[in-house]
Amino acid sequence: MTQAVLVLEDGRVFRGEAYGSIGITLGEAVFATGMTGYQETLTDPSYAGQIVVQTAPHIGNTGVNARDEESSKIWVAGYVVRDASRIVSNFRAESSLPTELEKYGVVGIAGIDTRALTRHLRSRGSMRAGIFSGPDALRPIEDLVAEVNSSVKMKGLSLSDTVTTPAQYTSPAEGEKIGRIAILDLGIKKSTIEHMNARGLETVVFPAKVDAATLLASEPDAVFFSNGPGDPEAAGGQVEVLREVLSRNIPFFGICFGNQLLGRALGFETYKLPFGHRGINQPVLDRKTGRVEVTAHNHGFAVKVDGGPEVDSPAGFGRVAVSHVSLNDDCVEGLECLDIPAFSVQYHPEAAAGPHDSNYLFDRLVDMIKTNKVAK
């Protein structure tokens, strides 16, 4: 057994055994509450820069396979589990999780009390951490704590350039073509594109730093801002692109990071949550229908909207409603513009590992495109 140690910036230490690659990794420690879908979590670009703690105790038993990947690689900075499965038992498995972690150089730790760690993060908030395995696990703890505290903080950090596509590409519509979507890739998951293509939408995917003129030159019927990692306050360029889109009354849909950027484009502030929402079991209330959706989440920031149920956009884009709210902490989970064709949600309607309560939002996007075409 190769020793490993997880060190938090406040000095809390958890000792276990190495899982994945041997070495050192630094990042923001966060917990994900999903009881399944660990491969989708690992390959979600929104987790870039984060050391992910799985609250489900038994991880790795179904192995990994190419079909369940949400992107081209594992993005997490580090991985923390309690009981790492010793065998793989699933007919779809093509490899084991430890092999996959080693393939992408992901340093992890297993055999620690993840419940105690989660409760600590739940009360103290997400914080910087480091996993040290092999010879580095034997270094003095005070040196490891100092190294963690010298690492970068998530607040103020821009990571879109790290996870975005290096070049523009197009994914064709399936069946009858309904329209074309210009996508700003801030860390998009492939299942999002699949949902759009399946509904007759051609998708043109652009790098995160594309300018408004290039984006709009594709003559889109709608624009989409994807999920992604980092602080929305550090995404000023993307906010300006979005304001240009909104000013032209082009339909807009955003999820996760895209929701936060819509909030900032409308003139609202964003703020860092104490520990964020991560996992596939987060309850959200749709204020319009009164329906409660169980949703997939991965975010550490939220939009701040005071007043309601309708407020005026501080940036002059008309009336805005908070369409969805979290039933855990009442934070904003969705925005709907009432005078321009734009809406967004803070969660992941594609939810490849489930649940699928929110898939209808892609149908809402299609309906908005069709309505806008008729209006023209």
Image (cartoon, rainbow, N blue to C red):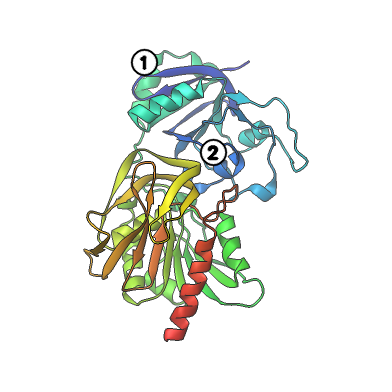
Q: Amino acid at mark 1?
A: Glu
Q: Is tag 2's residue or tag 1's residue first in the polypeptide sequence?
A: 2
Mark 2: give few (<14), some (14-19) or many (20+) Cα within 10 Å: many
Relative to 248, residue 226 above or below: above
Q: Position of residue 18 (x, y in %)?
A: 58, 22
Helix or strand or loop: what does disc 2 sit on? Answer: loop
* Residue tagged 1: 142
Q: Residue at x 36, y 15 (%)?
A: 142
Task: Judge whether residue 87 can be spotted in this image.
Answer: yes
Is residue 244 rendered to the left or right of residue 177?
A: left
Mark 1: give few (<14), some (14-19) or many (20+) Cα within 10 Å: few
* Residue tagged 2: 34
Of 302 and 371, the residue lying toward us: 371
Relative to 31, residue 372 above or below: below
Of 133 and 338, the residue lying toward us: 338
In three-dimensional space, the C-alpha distance between marks 2 and 1, rounded to whole angstroms, equals: 33 Å
Helix or strand or loop: what does disc 1 sit on? Answer: helix
Relative to 37, residue 238 above or below: below
Is residue 13 rendered to the left or right of residue 319?
A: right
> Residue 60 got which mark?
none
Task: Judge whether residue 168 can be spotted in this image.
Answer: no
Q: Amino acid at mark 2?
A: Gly
Relative to 274, residue 260 above or below: below
Q: Residue at x 41, y 45 (%)?
A: 299
Q: How many marks?
A: 2
Of 64 and 165, the residue lying toward us: 64
The C terminus is located in which quarter? bottom left
Is residue 72 rendered to the left or right of residue 254?
A: right
Of 358 and 202, the residue lying toward us: 358
Name the quadrant containing residue 7.
top left
